[in-house]
Amino acid sequence: MKTVVLVGGVGGAKLALGLAHVLPPDDLTIVVNTADDTWMYGLRVCPDLDTIMYTLSGLVDPQNGWGIAGDTTKLLEAMRRYGEDVWFKLGDQDFATHILRTRWLNAGHRLTSITERLAKRLSIPQCILPMVDLPVATIVDTVEHGEIDFQTYFVRYRWQPTVKSLRLDGIEKASISPELQQAVESADCLLVAPSNPWLSVAPILSIPGLRDLMLSRPIPRVAISPIVGGQAIKGPAAKLMTELGLEVSARSVVAYYGDIINGFVYDQVDHEIEVPLVHSTRLNTVMLTDNDKVQLATNVLEWMKSWAKTPS
C-alpha cells in the first residue's frame, strides 16, 4: 500500500517511524514541513527534516525526540565564550548535518536532492521529501512582539507569546517538486500525521497546486488527530487553537482540514465526539513507546484498507 504521509515535529516523526516498521521502504514517502527552517550561526537548519532523519536512522535523542542522542555542545560553549547569544541549541554532531547542507545549497543543489543524499548516508531506505525546495517561512504575529520568525516564537520565547495570526513568507513562489507530484499521483493512500495542523501541516497544504492534486486522488486521505481529550499531546497546538478562537477538540481539527480529508482517526478517549465524516474511527493515538507507534501505524493502515476501494 503506497503511502504518502505529511509530517512535522516530533508527533510526525513518531508516526513515520511506526510506518517505516510496517511498510516496505519503497511504499513509504514522508513529506516534511520546511516552513520552520531557519538560518542559524550562518548555517541552514531544517529542524523537522533532521528530526525525521535522526528518528528513522536510530540516532535521535529518545528523551527530547529531536537532536542526536549523547550529543555534546562544545562548539556552542566556545561561541558563548566569544560573546555570542546561543539561544538556539545545536549539538556538535548536529552541526555536521547543517554544514554539509549549507555547503551543498551554496553549490546550487536542491533541498530535495540534498535530503536524499543525507538520508542515504544515514542508511535510511525510505523516501524523505522536503515540502518544497525554495525557502518558505512561518511568520507569527504576536501580541507581545509583533511579527517574529517561527524559531524565535517556538524556541527563544518557548511558544509563550500570544498569537494573533500566522502567515507564510515565500509560499507564492513555491511549487510542487517532480518527486512530490509523482509520490502523490502514485499513492494508494494519503496520511496526515498527528502534527500541529496550523504550524506543521498547513505550510505543506499551502503549496500552490498541492491541495487540488490531493483532492483529485480518489483514495483514502486520512488525518490523525493531535488533540486527545481536549489537550495537545505535546507543543503549542491547544494554546494556539484557543488564541485563534477555536474549540480545543478533534472536531476543530476535522473542520480545519475540510474536504482535503475523507477519513479521520481520533483517540479512544474522545468517545463523545461526533465527526461529520463517513469514514472515522477511534484508536489509541498516544505514542509513548515504539510499540505504540507501530501499533497505530498498523491499525490505521488496516482500517484504511477496509474502505480503500470506495472512499467517500
Image: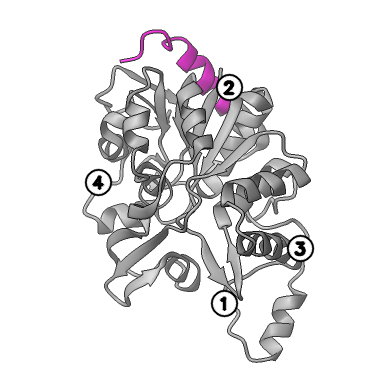
The label on residue 93 is 3
Task: Give the image location of residue 111, x and y in percent.
Answer: 58, 52
Provide the residue designation for mark 1.
Answer: 87
Residue 175 image point, x, y percent: 41, 45
Distance from Cα at disc 3 to Cα at disc 4: 41 Å
> In the image, is 139 to the left or to the right of 95?
left
Q: Amino acid at mark 1?
A: Trp
Viewport quadrant of the C terminus: top left
User: Alpha-carbon distance for marks 1 and 4?
Assistant: 33 Å
- Residue 78 appears in the figure: yes
- Closer to viewer: mark 3 or mark 4: 3
Upstream in sequence: badge 3 or badge 4: 3
Give the class, few, some or many, for how many residues have Cα within 10 Å of label 1's Cα (few <14, many ≥20).
Answer: few
Name the amino acid, label 2: Thr
Give the residue furthest to the front.
108
Which of 215 and 293 lies nearest the eye of the viewer?
215
**Pointer 4 or 2: first along the chain:** 4
- Can residue 271 be seen here? The reply is no
In magenta stretch: residue 37: no
Magenta residues?
A: 297-312
What residue sits right under mark 4 in the picture?
Answer: 247
Give me the C-alpha separation between circle 1 and circle 3. 18 Å
Q: Quadrant of residue 143?
A: bottom left
Please tell me whether mark 3 sits on a helix, a strand or a loop: helix
Mark with earlier residue (1, 3): 1
Q: Give the residue furthest to the left.
A: 245
Q: From what the image shows, is residue 307 above or below residue 267? A: above
Which one is earlier in the sequence, the residue at label 1 or at label 4? 1
Residue that numbered label 2 is attached to:
298
- Across and down, in percent, residue 186 comes to 50, 22
Which SS class for mark 2?
helix
